[in-house]
């Protein structure tokens, strides 16, 4: 799925299991209440901070000084890099669904194409794109309008088997492949439409209990504290209170359910539609509009990496002295392989040192084109950082494309695959939605309840490996900014060698039923990115460099 669905949808899907059947009257939905964080006595694995959630900047904090499993980047800047200044500006490309170029926390750090004269209506750098000042919108139809929705890759392959419009320009799979695709498509259709029905049921239930509580409690917003203090006068109101609080405990308020319904409605209407093709008249070079119809995801990712570092800002990026190049290649649907390949090449050709890719899907018929672009980035020494996915699955068994592994068995040397951790620590250190893999996931990074920039000048919390990847991209940019003799490949090595490990720590296996597994077994390094340790290692290597 594009950009990986917001991680809270995984919680919502699990909650839906107890909902009403499609078409039936809404019934109370039993939502599992999260257990309190558990700590172990091995390597520090701190519990959650006091209160209902983490500090807004928890992902940048340190275990030793803040008792939360962040990356220690603020401590590194404060202690190890005090008195030093960044030595260069690091260009980070964000290949995503769009970036709000007017956001006050991002506008000062956006890349400006030095080869283009803004607003002159000409293609000054001769790359086929007029006025690509902030980057490139790959997604444009033949009519020049930005593409918003697209189909799943599975739908395109299934449609190609049947000669339907969604499969145009997709090579027809083999007969046996088409049989497998038909089975997978049917299962996907049932999953999407079933979940959508359950979301609607939960929405109806929330509306009912909210109305009941509002009437009983009188005017005023229903806040957690207010509902907890309320003493129900009947068994029905007691049940309404319990359900409201259960949903709130799992982050399933009205806003989240509306967002979930919108996401799954889009999947049902467009993602599965074998007759839908947003490129019926062919493809065009794209255009300069890097914001697009829905820039939430890309704006959030960009802010994690490099939002302006000012004490007055609600959100600050991990890295100072970055420039963000926006490349819009991810629609509401599955990104297309040739668009991913073209985006990587654009970023490399325009000087990006790090490329963040917070998207993924389960099928990749054009993987050869993506592999070629990855090799091109590899030849130029550009680091690619990719989100592992939010399906709670083992990437060693079920890959999330694009991947670093090629058909010949070789693996791209310029790639980092990132899983997500939570602020809760202990047995809940790994986010329950995160993909993992001892062979295909390199390391973990904070990815739950991350506050970052949102379109329109706002801020918002989001969860997903899509948030964990830019944390790692930010650490890479921080190292490159302060240590100008390091290459992106040097930085990759430092990041992997300096991860924080938790010897003896067992965590709840993502996507499972509470089964415990060693944290060390979930990735190649068995560790969590540690900016403080990475800076310390970079300082040590700086001393011994000739």
Image: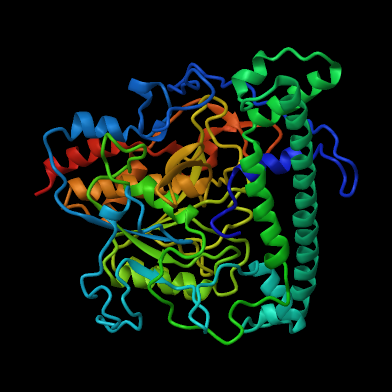
* Nearer to us in this view, 111 or 80: 111
Left or right of 152 on screen, residue 329: left
Measured along the vertical axis of the image, is residue 288 above or below residue 82?
A: below
Residue at the image position 44 percent from the left and 66 percent from the top: 328
Measured along the vertical axis of the image, is residue 189 above or below residue 250?
A: below
| Residue 75: image location, x then y, percent | 27, 29
Q: Residue at the right extreme?
A: 24
Measured along the vertical axis of the image, is residue 410 above or below residue 437?
A: below
From the image, which quarter does the N terminus lie in?
Answer: bottom right
- Residue 111 appears anywhere in the view: yes
Q: Using the rendered view, name the quadrant where residue 414 is placed.
A: bottom left
Q: Using the rendered view, name the quadrant where residue 214 is placed.
A: top right
Residue at the image position 41 percent from the left and 35 percent from the top: 59
| Residue 286: image location, x then y, percent | 43, 78
Residue at the image position 57 percent from the left and 26 percent from the top: 427
Residue at the image position 42 percent from the left and 74 percent from the top: 342
Q: Residue at the front extreme?
A: 219
Report the label total: 0
Q: Using the rendered view, name the quadrant where residue 374 is placed.
A: bottom left
Q: Residue at the bottom extreme?
A: 281
Q: How is the image coloured?
A: rainbow
* Nearer to us in this view, 59 or 499: 59
Left or right of 117 on screen, residue 171: right
| Residue 35: image location, x then y, percent | 64, 22
| Residue 402: image location, x then y, percent | 52, 63
- Residue 472 appears anywhere in the view: no
Q: Residue at the left extreme?
A: 546
């Amino acid at each position: 799925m594009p950009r990986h669905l917001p991680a809270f949808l995984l919680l919502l899907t699990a909650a839906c299991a107890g909902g009403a059947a499609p078409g039936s009257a809404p019934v109370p939905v039993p939502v599992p209440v999260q257990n309190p964080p558990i700590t172990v006595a091995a390597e520090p694995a701190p519990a959650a901070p006091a209160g209902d959630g983490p500090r807004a900047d928890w992902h940048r904090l340190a275990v030793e000084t803040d008792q939360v499993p962040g990356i220690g980047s603020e401590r590194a800047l404060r202690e190890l890099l005090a008195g030093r200044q960044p030595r260069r500006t690091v260009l980070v490309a964000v290949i995503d669904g769009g970036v709000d170029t007017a956001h006050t926390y991002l506008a000062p750090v956006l890349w400006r194409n030095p080869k283009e004269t803004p607003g002159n209506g000409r293609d000054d750098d001769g790359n086929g794109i007029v006025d690509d000042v902030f980057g490139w919108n790959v997604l444009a139809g033949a009519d020049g309008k930005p593409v918003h929705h697209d189909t799943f890759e599975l739908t395109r392959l299934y449609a190609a088997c049947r000669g339907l419009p969604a499969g145009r320009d997709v090579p027809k799979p083999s007969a046996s492949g088409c049989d497998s695709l038909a089975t997978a498509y049917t299962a996907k259709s049932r999953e999407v439409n079933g979940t959508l029905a359950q979301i609607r049921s939960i929405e109806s239930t929330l509306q009912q209990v909210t109305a009941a509580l509002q009437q009983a409690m009188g005017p005023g917003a229903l806040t957690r504290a207010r509902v907890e203090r309320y003493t129900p006068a009947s068994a029905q109101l007691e049940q309404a209170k319990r359900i409201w609080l259960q949903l709130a405990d799992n982050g399933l308020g009205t806003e989240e359910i509306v967002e979930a319904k919108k996401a799954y409605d889009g999947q049902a209407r467009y993602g599965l539609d074998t007759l839908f093709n947003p490129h019926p008249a062919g493809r065009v070079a794209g255009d300069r509009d890097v914001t697009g119809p829905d820039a939430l995801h890309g704006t959030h990712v960009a802010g994690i990496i490099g939002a302006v570092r000012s004490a007055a800002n609600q959100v600050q990026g991990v890295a100072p002295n970055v420039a963000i190049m926006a490349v819009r290649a991810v629609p509401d649907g599955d990104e297309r392989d040739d668009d991913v390949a073209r985006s990587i090449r654009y970023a490399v050709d325009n000087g990006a040192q790090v490329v963040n890719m917070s998207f993924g899907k389960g099928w990749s018929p054009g993987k050869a084109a993506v592999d070629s672009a990855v090799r091109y980035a590899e030849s130029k020494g550009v680091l690619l950082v990719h989100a592992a996915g939010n399906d709670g699955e083992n990437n060693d068994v079920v890959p999330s494309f694009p991947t670093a592994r090629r058909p010949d068995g070789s693996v791209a040397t310029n790639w980092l695959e990132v899983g997500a951790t939570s602020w809760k620590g202990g047995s809940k250190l790994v986010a329950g939605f995160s993909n993992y893999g001892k062979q295909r996931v390199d390391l973990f990074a904070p990815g739950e309840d991350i506050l970052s920039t949102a379109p329109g000048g706002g801020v918002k919390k989001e969860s997903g490996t899509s948030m964990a990847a830019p944390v790692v991209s930010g650490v890479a940019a921080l190292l490159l900014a302060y240590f100008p003799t390091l290459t992106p490949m040097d930085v990759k090595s430092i990041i992997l060698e300096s991860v924080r490990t938790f010897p003896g720590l067992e965590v709840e296996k993502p996507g499972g039923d509470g089964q415990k597994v060693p944290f060390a077994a979930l990735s190649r390094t068995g560790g969590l990115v540690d900016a403080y340790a990475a800076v310390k290692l970079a300082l040590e290597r700086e001393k011994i460099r000739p």
